[in-house]
Amino acid sequence: MVAFAKQKSAVTTGASLPVLLALAAAAAFLVVGSISSSIFAQQTVAGLAQGAIFGSLALALVLIYRATEVINFAQGELAMATTYIAYQLTLWGLSYWLSFFLTLLIAFVLGAVVQVVFIRPIQHSVIAVVIVTVGMFILIDGLVTWKWGADLKFMKAPFGNTVYHAGGVAFSRQDIGVLLVSILSVILLWVLFQFTKLGLAMRAAALRPAAAALVGVRVNWMLAIGWGLAAVLGAVAGLMTEPTQFLQPTMMQAILLYAFAAAVLGGLESPAGAVIGGLALGVFLNLIGQYVGFATSELRLPIAFAVLLIVLLIKPTGLFGRRQVRRV
Amino acid sequence: MKYVVVAIAAAVVALLPFGLSGYHQGLAVYVAIYFIAIFGLNILTGYTGQISIGHGAFMAIGGYATVILSHDHHVNLIATLPLAFAITFACGVLVGIPALRLSGVYLALATFALAVSVPQLPLKFSKYLGGSNGLQTDHSVSHLWLYGVSWSCAAILFVAGWLLLRGRIGRAFRAIRDSELAAASSGVSLPIYKTFAFGVSAAFAGVAGSLFVLATNGYAQPNEFGVLLSLKILIGAAVAGLGSLWGVAIGAVFIGLLPEISASVPLIGSSHGEDVVFGLIVILVMLLLPNGFAGLLRRVDSSFKTAIKSDSQAS
C-alpha cells in the first residue's frame, strides 16, 4: 500500500511561460478563424458551450482531488441523479429555475452526506475510496434506472430555442445560456474560495490538514463541504447537459470521461487548469469533427484521450500541474 | 500449510465439473477468467506499484487476437492462447514505455484512457474488426472444454506468476513499489523492470480476454470490453487486497459470482435491482475491509498465531 501513500511534495506552482504562450496562440487562432469563417465561429461557440460543461465537471473532480487525492468516479452519476431530481421537481409543478436552485441545494446536501457516510470512514486508504466511488457509480445507475426507467425523458428547454444572427453567424441562445451559467458558477466558486473565510479554511484543510486542524479549522467538515460543492458543480453540469442530451441514465458517462481528460490536461490540482482544459477540449473536438474527415464520432473519445496522452508525455503533470519533487 | 491449501483447492477445481451443471460450469469459467486478469493486475499494481485502470483494454486486445486468428487464419483455438499472450505482452511493453514518464494518478488516468479508447476502435475499423456486431471464432466450444482449458490456464499462469514473484524479479518489483529511488540506487533498472511488469501483467489480461471471448460463445464485441470490465477487474483486485496472492481467488469469486447472486436477490423486484445490490455490496465490502480480503486473512492469520502461542505458553 506504500505506493498509494500521500507523498507531500515541494511546490513549484502555476503555468510555465511556454504553456501560456501556447494558450495565447491558440486563442488568437480561434479569434482569427472566427472572423474569417462563419462556420468556424459557430463551431467555436458550440465547442465553448460543450467545453464549459466538461470544465465544470472537471472542476468538481479537481475540488475533490485537491482535498482527498482521489478521483471520484461517481461524479458524473451524481450529476445525472441530481438532474433527475430537478426533472421530478418540475413534474411536481415547480418552475424550471426554482427547481434548478432547489436541486443545487439538494445536490450540496447529497454530496456532503456521501462524504460523511461512505468516504470518511476509509479516507486514509486512497484505493478503497476509489473503489467505493466505483461502487457508487454502479449503485446510482441502478437506483435511477429503477426509479425513472432507462428511456429518454425531456425537460422544458431552459433558454428557449431562439437563434441569434450576427453577421452571417448563427448563435443558439441555448449554447450561450449554457456557457454563461457554467462560467458564472465557476466564478462564484472562485469568489467563495478566494475571498471568504470559509474558502480560506477549505483551502487550508485541503493543502495542510494537520496544520489547519491546529489553528482550529474543522478539517472533516471542510472536506464534507468540499464534496457538497463538487456535487453542486456536477448538478450544474448535468442540468446544462440536459437540453442537448436529454435525460437518460447514461447521459453523463461520456461527459465524465471528457471531464477526466480536461482535469488531467489542466493538471488535476489546478481549478483554472480544469476549466481551461475543458473549454480547450470542447472547442478542439468540435473543430476537428468539422474539418477532419477521418475524425468521425466513434473517434471522439479516442481523440480526446490521444490529446491527453500527448500532453502528459510532454508535461507529465498536465498543463498547469506542479512539478513533483520527491524527498526520500 | 500453504501447500496443503493449494493442493486442496486444486483437487476441488479438478473434481468440480463432475458435480456441476453446464450453466454453473460456465460461471466457474468466468471465475477462472477473472482470476487470471486480477492476478495480472496484481502483478503490476500490487507488486510493482504501478496503478492501471486499463486492463479491460488488454483483455480486448487478447480477445480480438483470438477471434481474428481463428476467424481469418483458422488457427487452433488452444494455439491462439499463447499467441494472445505474446501479442498482449508486446502491447503491454509498448504501453509501458510511455508510462515510464507517468506516476500515480496520472498513470491511472492514462491507462483509463486506453480502456476507453480501445473498444472504440472496432467501431471505427469495422471492416477488419466487425464493428458493433463483433466477430466470431470459426467454431464454438463446450462448457466442459472451456472449464478444463480456463482452469488449466489459470493454474499454469498462477504457478508461473508465483515463481516470477518469489525470485529475483519479484524482489525487484517490490523494491520499485516500496521506493523507486532506493530501488534504482541499489542497481534495479527501473525502465526494464517497469516495462517488463507492464508486459507480463498485460499478457495475463490478454489470456483472460481470449478465454472471455471463448466463454461468450466465441463472440468478440466492443461493448463486452467496455470501461465497466476494467473497473470490475480493479474492484476484484481491491477486494482481493493488493500485493497478496491468496486474496486473488476470493476477488475472482467475488467478481465472477456477485452479479449472479445480486440478480437473484428479490429485494427490488426488477431487472435493475442487480446493479443496486452489486453496488451496495461493493461499497459495504470496501467499508468493512479497506485492505481487501488479504487484509482480513492477514489479521486472522496473526490472531491465529498469537492464539497458538498463548496456548503453548499456558500449557
Image: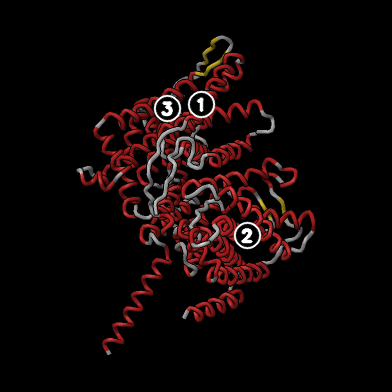
Q: Distance between the residues labelled 3 and 2?
A: 44 Å
As drawn, is B196 to the left or to the right of A5?
A: right
**Discs 1, 2: same chain:** no
The disc at residue A182 is 3
Tell me how far mark 1 sits from mark 2, CA to CA.
Answer: 42 Å
Residue A266 is labelled as: none
Taking the image as shown, residue A2 lies to the left or right of residue B200, namely: left
Q: In this view, does B205 lie above or below A12?
A: below
Q: Which amino acid does label 3 sit on?
A: Ser
Residue position for label 1: A21
The image quadrant of residue A29 is: top right
Residue at 36%, 74% in the rendered image:
B302
Mark 2 residue type: Ala
**Mark 2 burial class by Cα count in 10 Å: few <14, some 14-19, many 20+:** many
Tell which circle, 1 or 3, labels the residue nearer the N-terminal end. Answer: 1
Callout 2: chain:
B
Q: Which residue lies furthest to the bottom in this view?
A: B315
